[in-house]
Image (cartoon, rainbow, N blue to C red):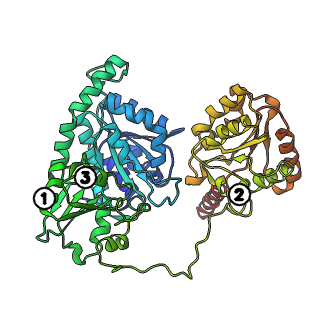
Amino acid sequence: MEKMLLLGDEAIAQAAIDAGMSGIYAYPGTPSTEIMEYVQASAEAKSRKIRSLWSANEKTAMETALGMSYAGKRTMVCMKHVGLNVAADAFINAAITGANGGLIVVAADDPSMHSSQNEQDSRFYGKFALIPILEPANQQEAYDMVHEGFQLSEEMRVPVLLRITTRLAHSRTGIARKQVKEQNPLQLPSNLKQFILLPSIARKQYRELLTKQSAFEAAAEKSSFNTFFAHPDSKLGIIACGLAYNYLIENFEQHQVPNPVLKIGQYPVPRDLVNRLYEQCDELLVLEDGYPMLEELLKGMLNKGKRIKGRLDGTLPRDGELSPAIVADALGLGHQRGNEVSSLVKNRPPRLCDGCGHHDAFTALNQALEAYGRGRVFSDIGCYTLSALEPLESINSCVDMGASITMAIGAADAGLIPAVAAIGDSTFTHSGITGLLDAINNQSPITVLILDNSTTGMTGGQTSSAFGKVEDICRGLGVPEEHIIVIKPLRKYHDENVEIIRKELSYNGVSVIIPRRECIQTLNRKLRQKAKEKLMEGNQ
């Protein structure tokens, strides 16, 4: 078998290509972004005519993937954990429609919030939807689980959730590839009413999903991803879920743990294996990267008097990602490996790039708002969120994708006038359009800044769904033509931009200002590519 050195994200992408995937859909979000980027850059994927599309948001990506599954093809949809909130409507209902072609939903969680606004654990969504969950301990398992996941999805006729975390997504190791599979032929469901969730059909489909639960549990009991490692020391038994298994074994020479260990990588929880460990040991320690989901389940399943330790009782921290040092403390080993970062090493806070147009846009906004006072700018998720920090300190909220416009509407309704919304071009088409429609229908006195840098900048420069369309979208929604204004956020236009913003702040209705300037990173990338091409032409 061919060996490749891959990130966890890349291993998932390569596995999907090898496993006969026909299409992949996603919205960029760290730590999941590299899955789609790998497929789009793959000559092998191109030769196999694999469809790879950045969608407007995670919900549309989920629905598009479900459509490909309906047609019998293997498909994957990728998102970060908060993106699963956006896709939840389609995701939960997809468990009831079931799958035709294999359907894998990849959710990349971010414990410790390296680049996210919360720490949610996507395993809860899988449990809520009543579908199988796969959680790899390493990159090779991530690769293997994609193959198994497609097969499991087609055998059980349901979507499968593949849950990964930041460390696995962005660390690299050698991967052994499997034999490449051909793509599925086009084949419609045998029951053409399967995907019609009218109540009478949905009730039947839901009952079928419930009857499959025993099969899901049996598959988990037999799964090679759930492994029991016996040991004669019965004082403490350890359950390690997904990547937490690596944090455990790194504390011991030759990775030999001196305790009985149950490694879990496939859910539903393998009850027989858990009971075997429980009956053998005096107490249990549960290691899971994320919420104490399994720990809570076990305290219900195994309420027989023995202590179950983990995040709930303080043995492990309640928040943040695990590490070998944290696991060592929980085992009473102390910090055996690795050193703490010196207090002399200072973190460098994030900031807008030098030459970023957002800096000039917010500098103008700050001055235009001086007459009204602070505390009236509602923002969103993107590079421009860094304007919350010094020296700009421009914005006053960042809750979820698209919340800037709707929060400004509510604040204006409460009497905070003028209220300002700041949203990026990609975030606008992701989930801001409906908020702007609400503002127009309500005739809200808000000023909306759609910060157009012509890309999805925060996640690496993917093409924005809004590219070349922002003004047309605003006109179509009903923003008056005279209150759709494009400005150039440059220092030489500062005074002019301040006056434009001041004028729109005084308007008693919905106005849209579009500060448009290409992202400095994508611009530099284009210039470097042009210089490289020119040099190659000269050498020829």
The span from disc 1 to disc 2 (Cα, nearest Å) is 61 Å
Q: Secondary structure at mark 2?
A: loop
Q: Which marked residue is nearer to the observer: mark 1 or mark 2?
A: 1
Q: Position of residue 102 (x, y in %)?
A: 30, 37
Q: Position of residue 325 (x, y in %)?
A: 37, 74
Q: Position of residue 206 (x, y in %)?
A: 29, 27
Q: Amino acid at mark 3?
A: Leu
Task: Give the residue at x 21% y 52%.
Answer: 303
Q: Which residue is mark 2?
A: 356
Residue occupying the point 80% across, 53% down: 366
Q: Quadrant of the N terminus?
A: bottom left
Residue tagged by mark 1? 279
Q: Residue at x 29, y 78 (%)?
A: 333
Identified by mark 2, the residue type is Cys
Give the alpha-carbon distance from disc 2 to disc 3, as whole Å: 50 Å
The disc at residue 91 is: none
Q: Name the residue at the front extreme.
A: 305
Residue that carries the numbered disc 3 in the rendered image: 298
